[in-house]
Amino acid sequence: DGKNIGRRIGDVNGDGFVTLEDIRRVESFIGGSITLTAAEIFAADVNGDGGIDVRDAELIENYLNTGSGNFAVCNTNFF
């Protein structure tokens, strides 16, 4: 759809993995202490609603806690 600009869904910091650091970046963005690049925004919007909010952080956390291999927005496995 033209939105994927080289970043995996959930991998907000672009290190190739979905980790606690990605949740921290989303939470920092929500709190207003950082800004995100276009690639980071793409990766952080894991529910695909067009915004970055607490629900995105919760979904990334759930992904890490349960070992679920996908996010609903892409229904694609990313480990």
Image (cartoon, grey):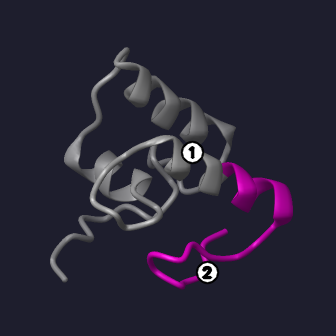
Callout 2: few (<14), some (14-19), or many (20+) C-alpha neighbours within 10 Å?
few
Mark 1 to mark 2 CA distance (whole Å): 18 Å
Between 19 and 62, the residue placed more toward the observer is: 62
Image quarter where the N terminus lies is bottom left
Label 2 amino acid? Asn
Task: Please give the name of the residue rendered at 63% of the width and 48% of the height, measured from the top-left corner.
Answer: 58
**Residue 54 visible in image:** yes
Q: Answer with left or right where residue 48 lies relative to residue 58.
A: left
**Image position of 49 with respect to 53: above or below:** below
Quarter of the view holding residue 57: top right
**Residue 18 visible in image:** no
Q: Give the magenta-colored segment's residue range.
A: 61-79
Q: Residue 47 in the image: x percent, y percent? A: 46, 65
**Image position of 3 with respect to 54: above or below:** below
Residue pushed farthest top? 33
Asked whether residue 67 is drawn in magenta, I would say: yes
SS for callout 2? loop
Q: Which mark is residue 57?
A: 1
Residues at circles 1 and 2 in contact by the CB criterion of under 8 Å: no
Q: Residue 20 in the image: x percent, y percent? A: 68, 39
Q: Tell me the residue that label 2 is attached to.
A: 77
Quarter of the view holding residue 76: bottom right
Label 1 amino acid? Ala
Between 68 and 17, the residue placed more toward the observer is: 68
